[in-house]
Image (cartoon, grey):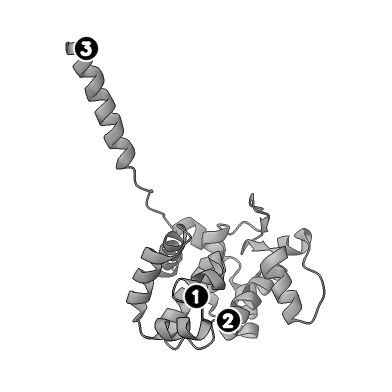
Amino acid sequence: MNIRWLIVLVLVLAGCSSHTTKQPEWDPTKPVQRALTWMPITEQAAKEWGVSPRVVTAIIAVESGGNPALVSKSNAVGLMQIKASTAGKDVYRHLGWGGQPSTSELKDPARNISIGTAYLSILEHGILAGIEDPETMQYALLASYANGAGALLRTFSSDRKKAIDEINDLSPDEFYQYIAKNHPAPQAPRYLYKVSKALNAM
């Protein structure tokens, strides 16, 4: 009888521990320090494309930890973890070029940062144009960079103009909370949280 209760107790405790597992706190200190080493390139690209160099640096910290040779399982490459077939192709098209960047091009820090920064600019002045509050725009840019602008807007409405109007009715904090609760990609709120921590660590 005592052994049976001991087994039940062990099973209950094991079940409890599995339900209370939390994601560990993310420490941005080292990734931000490594990302800041690329700041001369980042500032130049940010100036060229009208993007905040701090946002680009925070993305580098979160995406690659400042490692220009990193290639993910989904074939996202380099400092800003750019996928050649999506963001890379969009930037090439915007520049009037055919094709898409090669892996070796995306492993080059200057090219990677230039393409990633250009992509942020394309998002801001393209599909996300019309978002009025700068802080909300920053959150929208980050969520779109990570999971696509279409997924972000569809969280509000299938009609782009209606989605932008709904976003403009929210404060930045309300927008952040809405994305955390409603974005179809479960990693979206975690991404916003990590980039915000990286920004605060600078």
Identify residue for label 2. 127
Report the front residue among 4 and 34: 4
Q: Residue at x 79, y 82 (%)?
A: 96
Marks 2 and 1 in Cβ contact (< 8 Å): yes
Q: Is residue 89 left or right of residue 25?
A: right
Amino acid type at circle 1 is Leu
Amino acid type at circle 3 is Ile
- Name the mark nearer the viewer: 3 or 1: 1
Q: Secondary structure at mark 3?
A: helix
Identify residue for label 1. 153
- Picture quadrant where residue 12 is located: top left
Picture coordinates of residue 91, whole percent (x, y) = 71, 75
Q: Is residue 10 above or below residue 156?
A: above
Q: Is residue 109 left or right of residue 37?
A: right
Picture coordinates of residue 84, whole percent (x, y) = 72, 64
Give the alpha-carbon distance from disc 3 to disc 2, as whole Å.
63 Å
Q: Residue at x 36, y 85 (%)?
A: 169
